[in-house]
């Protein structure tokens, strides 16, 4: 059964001559429990798909469904319990004057949980932060620890789908490894479905079973991980991305 | 071939309430006509090293060194006025994000012309011609239009190329590039790198390339310094970076996900407190 299905999604900003089509006719199907990647350069519309899915962009057409929810212009309250998002920059996505305890407590009480105290302890434990972190403020945490708090907040309402918008691109490679391992463990433990946006093909290949490659708002190719590792893309743009990911290669530019 | 830059026992100190914090601790290295990479995590002191060379550390931060020689002249003994003529003319720096390093309310042409006239005293007309020529050198199509534009009208890749043009218009001997492509997409990144590569080769410049991307440095530079906690823990040939021996470098390499070598789990870096205290490795030539 597919957990996320998006059919012929169009997203635009502005009206009339100012109209910009950010996503054009995108279709994605993600099976329950799978992990699906979206790659492409900035402005290709990959984050816009995530934002349209959670209802942060009102101007879209087409059809989207997550699990049992068929999405319209309004979403039921328990949709937000089931679908959560982790943003790119943990420095910007946590309130600077709220302690970890407040951040998690607020989310839990909004979703109507009762045993908040125990749940906060459990969540911190899940993301590999001890109880000592509970009353700290974001400025007392490193980038990796902040991203762990953001992941804990996303896990708080016990979602089945996590939308990850470049979850590690603001982090150092050593910290990135820890966060990616954590995300892999959590997916297994909580049977989560991931939809992950990244510009780093190696990260997507590590995390996802399949990925869609986007260019100028269109999905140009859907590639499974075996083809990606074998450097076997169909579309020239995907090939270009794969080659750029390998590092700097002067001969490639001359031929391009 | 003589070295362009020789630095011995460079130290950058910031006084704090908890005592002095040393961001860079006694590092020595030299730069010839080569592409020298400096890699490390955030907070390892790589950007501070780049800024210290240009004496761009604000008080109360302090720069100390036994020797910091540019072509035999000691940079630390220069007056502020003399430093002004070094910055931009002999050593230039390209920062990470063009959005923050270009003046948002000045036309591109005026910004490039200003720096060129400041250092050479050329006429406005000559400076304009030179600026156009530089924009062409960094592969900007339609330079006439770009000259008249403001920075917000440019994309990230264009902005970074304009920065490079501006920094190279005075034909410096050394370019310090601090994460010049981190804010850019991979496809644009290759373009910007090839421009830096070509200009460095053609003009026989020295390049200090500061980055956290190990693969990029390994494929782009000639020699690499690996920094940890303000010290150089290892130096090696860029081509041999993947055979590096220090456990920190191995740890960084191991934590990268790789397309050609899938792993079920990534190796998280285990830090050894001894790395912090080990003496700095010399990067002198």
Image: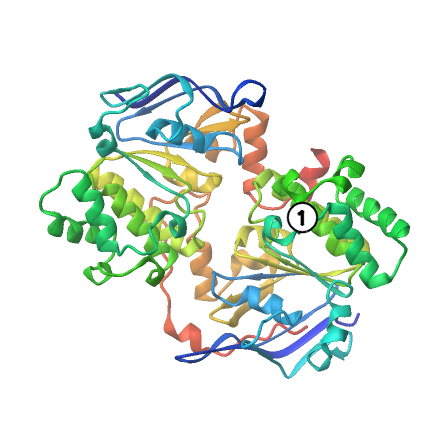
Q: Which residue is mark 1?
A: B105
Q: Residue furthest bottom?
A: B66
Is B151 drawn above or below residue B227 in the view shown? above
Residue located at (43% from left, 65% from top): B247
Is B172 drawn above or below residue A1 in the view shown? below
Q: Is residue B20 left or right of residue B188?
A: left
Residue located at (65% from left, 74% from top): B284
Q: Quadrant of the C terminus of chain B?
A: bottom right
Q: Is residue A215 left or right of residue A125?
A: right
For the question of whether residue B259 can be seen, the reply is no
Q: For residue B67, what is the image quadrant?
A: bottom right
Q: Residue furthest left?
A: A115
Where residue B44 sits: x, y (%)? Answer: 49, 66
Where residue B197 sits: x, y (%)? Answer: 71, 50
Where residue A241 sits: x, y (%)? Answer: 55, 35
For the question of whether residue B90 can be seen, the reply is yes
Image label count? 1
Q: For residue A188, what is the image quadrant?
A: top left
Residue located at (71% from left, 34% from top): A255
Is A205 drawn above or below residue A25 in the view shown? below
**Neighbours of disc 1 within 10 Å: few (<14), some (14-19), many (20+):** few
Where residue B185 sits: x, y (%)? Answer: 56, 40
Q: Is residue B19 left or right of residue B5?
A: left
Q: Residue furthest front?
A: B105
Q: Is residue B251 left or right of residue A109?
A: right
| Of residues A3 and B19, the one drawn nearer to the viewer in this rendering | B19
Colouring used for the render: rainbow
User: Disc 1 sits on a residue from what chain?
Assistant: B
Q: Quadrant of the N terminus of chain B?
A: bottom right
């Amino acid at each position: 059964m597919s957990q996320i299905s998006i059919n012929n999604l169009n997203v635009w900003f502005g009206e009339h001559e100012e109209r910009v089509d950010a996503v054009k006719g995108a279709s994605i199907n993600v099976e329950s429990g799978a992990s699906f990647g979206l790659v492409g350069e900035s402005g290709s519309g990959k984050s816009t798909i995530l934002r349209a899915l959670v209802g942060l962009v009102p101007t879209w057409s087409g059809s989207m469904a997550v699990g049992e929810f068929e999405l319209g212009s309004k979403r039921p309250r328990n949709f937000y319990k089931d679908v959560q998002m982790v943003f790119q920059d943990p420095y910007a996505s946590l309130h600077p004057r709220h302690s970890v305890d407040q951040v998690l407590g607020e989310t839990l009480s909004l979703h109507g949980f009762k045993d908040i105290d125990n749940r906060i302890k459990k969540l911190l434990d899940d993301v590999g932060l001890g109880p000592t972190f509970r009353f700290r403020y974001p400025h007392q945490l490193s980038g990796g620890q902040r991203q762990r708090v953001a992941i804990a907040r996303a896990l708080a309402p016990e979602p089945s789908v996590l939308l990850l918008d470049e979850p590690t691109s603001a982090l150092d490679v050593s910290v990135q490894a820890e966060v990616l391992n954590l995300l892999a463990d959590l997916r297994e433990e909580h049977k989560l479905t991931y939809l992950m946006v990244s510009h780093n093909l190696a990260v997507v290949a590590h995390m996802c079973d399949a990925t869609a490659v986007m260019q100028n708002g269109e999905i140009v190719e859907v590639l499974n991980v075996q083809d990606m590792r074998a450097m076997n893309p169909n579309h020239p743009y995907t090939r270009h991305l794969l080659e750029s990911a390998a590092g700097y290669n002067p001969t490639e530019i001359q031929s391009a | 071939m003589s070295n362009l830059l020789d630095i011995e026992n460079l130290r950058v100190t910031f006084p704090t309430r908890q005592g002095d914090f040393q961001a860079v601790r006694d590092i020595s290295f030299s730069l010839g006509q080569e592409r020298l990479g400096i890699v490390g995590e955030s907070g390892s002191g790589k950007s501070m090293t780049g800024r210290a060379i240009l004496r761009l550390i604000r008080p109360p931060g302090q720069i100390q060194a036994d020797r910091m020689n540019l072509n035999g002249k000691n940079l630390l003994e220069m007056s502020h006025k003399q430093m002004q003529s070094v910055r931009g003319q002999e050593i230039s720096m390209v920062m990470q994000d063009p959005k923050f390093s270009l003046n948002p309310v000045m036309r591109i042409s005026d910004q490039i012309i200003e720096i060129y006239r400041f250092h050479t005293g050329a006429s406005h007309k000559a400076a304009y011609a030179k600026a156009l020529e530089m924009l062409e050198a960094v592969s900007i199509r339609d330079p006439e239009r770009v000259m008249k534009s403001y920075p917000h009208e440019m994309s990230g890749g264009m902005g970074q190329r304009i920065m490079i043009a501006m920094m190279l218009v005075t034909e410096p001997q050394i370019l310090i590039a601090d994460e010049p492509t981190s804010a850019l997409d991979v496809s644009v990144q290759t373009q910007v790198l090839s421009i830096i590569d070509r200009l460095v080769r053609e003009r026989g410049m020295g390049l200090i390339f500061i980055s956290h991307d190990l693969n990029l440095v390994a494929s782009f530079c000639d020699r690499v310094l690996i920094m940890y906690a303000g010290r150089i823990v290892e130096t090696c040939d860029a081509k041999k970076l993947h055979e590096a021996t220090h456990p920190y470098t191995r740890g960084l390499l191991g934590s990268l996900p790789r397309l050609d070598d899938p792993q079920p789990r990534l190796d998280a870096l285990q830090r050894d407190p001894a790395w912090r205290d080990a003496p700095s490795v010399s990067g002198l030539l």
